[in-house]
Image: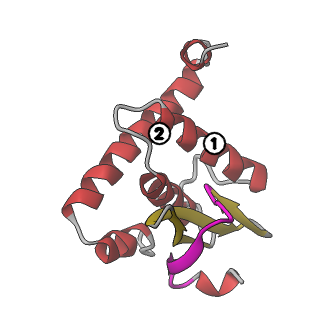
């Protein structure tokens, strides 16, 4: 079944979540274009975010579902897919849910060119990687300051 047909068959709640995530992806794109990366990471990982009482993940399955919905919203959005944009949105949601996380950025050499990729590592209660690719060598990470010790 084509992806658009699956989206059209989604429930109103699923469509609302996809719309919300699509909006967050657009906000992340604008922020990445306007502000330095370290400022965005301070914003994403700040302590002042209120706990999202409506949706606190009960298990790694909830977080994996959120990551999958972000992937779908990014793939079918108005902008070309972006691993960094997806990582920023997932890290922001995880921070709101008080889930220890960090964004990793890595590179790999392909055909004499460096290719970059961003992914999220989260501790829910065991370490998980979202949007990861084992071919990339990590160069930098941005972790929640007060939760960074929970991630090995």
Give the farthest residue toward the front. 111
User: Which quarter of the figure has residue 79?
Assistant: top left
Q: Residue at x 41, y 72 (%)?
A: 48
Which residue is the site of mark 1?
68
Q: Where's residue 90, x and y in %?
A: 53, 56
What is the quadrant of the C terminus in the image?
bottom right
Q: Where's residue 66, x and y in %?
A: 62, 46
Q: Nearer the viewer, residue 148 or 57?
A: 148
Residue 74 numbered mark, or none:
2
Q: Nearer the viewer, residue 66 or 83?
A: 83
User: Which quarter of the figure has residue 52?
Assistant: bottom right
Q: Earlier in the sequence, mark 2 or mark 1?
A: 1
Position of 43 with respect to 148 (left or right) is: left
Q: Is residue 87 above or below residue 140?
A: above
Mark 2 and mark 1: Cα distance apart in space: 10 Å
Secondary structure found at label 1: helix
Residue 39 within the segment the image draws in magenta: no
Q: Residue at x 25, y 52 (%)?
A: 30
What segment is highlighted magenta in the picture? 131-146
Crowdedness near tag 2: few (<14), some (14–19) or many (≥20) residues, C-alpha within 10 Å: many
Crowdedness near tag 1: few (<14), some (14–19) or many (≥20) residues, C-alpha within 10 Å: some
Q: Is residue 68 above or below residue 37?
A: above
């Amino acid at each position: 079944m084509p992806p658009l047909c699956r989206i059209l068959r989604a429930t109103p709640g699923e469509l609302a979540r996809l719309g919300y995530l699509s909006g967050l992806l657009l906000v992340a794109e604008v922020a990445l274009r306007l502000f330095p990366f370290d400022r965005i990471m301070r914003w994403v990982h700040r302590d002042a975010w209120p706990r999202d009482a409506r949706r606190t993940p009960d298990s790694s399955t909830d977080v994996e579902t959120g990551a999958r919905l972000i992937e779908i919203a990014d793939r079918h959005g108005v902008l070309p897919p972006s691993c960094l944009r997806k990582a920023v949105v997932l890290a922001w949601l995880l921070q709101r849910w008080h889930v220890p996380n960090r964004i990793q950025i890595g590179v790999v050499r392909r055909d004499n060119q460096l290719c970059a990729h961003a992914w999220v590592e989260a501790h829910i209660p065991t370490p998980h990687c979202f949007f990861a690719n084992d071919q990339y060598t990590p160069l930098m990470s941005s972790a929640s300051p007060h939760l960074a010790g929970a991630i090995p």
